[in-house]
Amino acid sequence: MVHGTMYDPEGDGLNNPHLTIYEVLRNAFAPFESISGIGWPSVSFTPGNLFEAWFKGHLTWYGLAVRNARLVSPPLSRLLSSLDGPYAIVCHSIGCDIARHAVSSAQRQPARILLINPDTDYAAFQEWSIAHGIPTLHVAAKRDSVLRFSQYARKNSKFQVAPRQDFYSMETINFDQFLPDGQRDSFSYGNPRRLWDHMASLEVPELWLRYREFLKF
């Protein structure tokens, strides 16, 4: 599992992905024998991190998160190459971009990849998935204003799933059917990071059955 922005694996409470988002995902994928969460410094929204972003030449926290994400992919690729058995990747937001770069150079390819509200280059991921024959499920929210500010937003606005291929599929979810009346609070933990359905794909239990079905291999 690879998380997105606004977490710090050395942080406390809601800032720590191992205490928050990965607990949700472990509940979602509990039937699987081994589940590991990759923590990386994805820049929580604090004044200190904003000053660090400015110091390193970025206007916002997101720019620093993108910079850090690029540093995570090489060691993750080496880790994946060292695995003994088959594995799947579950990633969210910019964590999907980390995964895209990591698998492109990994010596051992995943059996399946689940992209949840991905902040990555959709066309490039699709091309890789088809070329390597890796089943990839792309789950998107119908309303996801967070990704309007993605580094790939303009390019992804023109993305279309390639026809007549069995490896890359995309499902767009309207969360009004799961979260009526505009309710956007987490079911599982106090999550201040739910913004415009960007986190909802992770947390709606009805979707977990679909994820489990896809990840069987």
Image (cartoon, grey):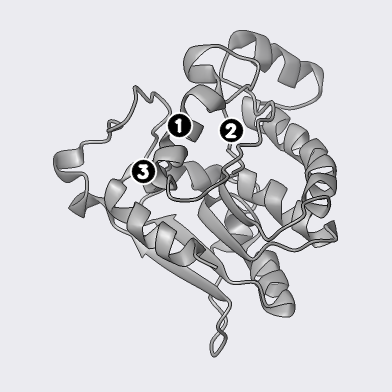
Which residue occupies the foreground of this view, 184 or 28?
28
The residue that mark 1 highlights is 23
Which residue occupies the foreground of this view, 28 or 72?
28
Q: Is residue 62 placed above or below 51 in the rendered structure?
A: below
The three-letter code of the residue at mark 1 reads Glu
Marks 3 & 1, CB-CB < 8 Å contact:
no
The residue that mark 3 highlights is 200
The three-letter code of the residue at mark 3 reads Ala
The residue that mark 2 highlights is 5
Which residue occupies the foreground of this view, 84 or 114?
84
Asked if residue 158 can be seen in this view, the reply is no
Q: Considering the numbered disc 3 on the image, is that residue within a helix, a strand or a loop? A: helix
- Structural crowding at the residue carrying mark 1, measured as other residues with C-alpha within 10 Å and reported as few (<14), some (14–19) or many (≥20): some
- Structural crowding at the residue carrying mark 2, measured as other residues with C-alpha within 10 Å and reported as few (<14), some (14–19) or many (≥20): many
What numbered label is drawn on residue 79? none
Q: Give the mark nearest the N terminus, 1 or 2.
A: 2
The three-letter code of the residue at mark 2 reads Thr
- Structural crowding at the residue carrying mark 3, measured as other residues with C-alpha within 10 Å and reported as few (<14), some (14–19) or many (≥20): many
Q: What residue lies at 36% left-to-right and 51% top-to-bottom?
A: 143
In space, the residues marked 3 and 1 are separated at their CA atoms by 15 Å
Q: Which image quarter: residue 85? A: bottom right
Q: Give the mark nearest the N terminus, 3 or 1.
A: 1
Q: Considering the numbered disc 1 on the image, is that residue within a helix, a strand or a loop? A: helix
Q: Which image quarter: residue 128? A: bottom right
Q: What residue lies at 32% left-to-right and 30% top-to-bottom?
A: 188
User: Which numbered mark, 1 or 2, is in the foreground of this view?
Assistant: 1
How many dots with numbers? 3
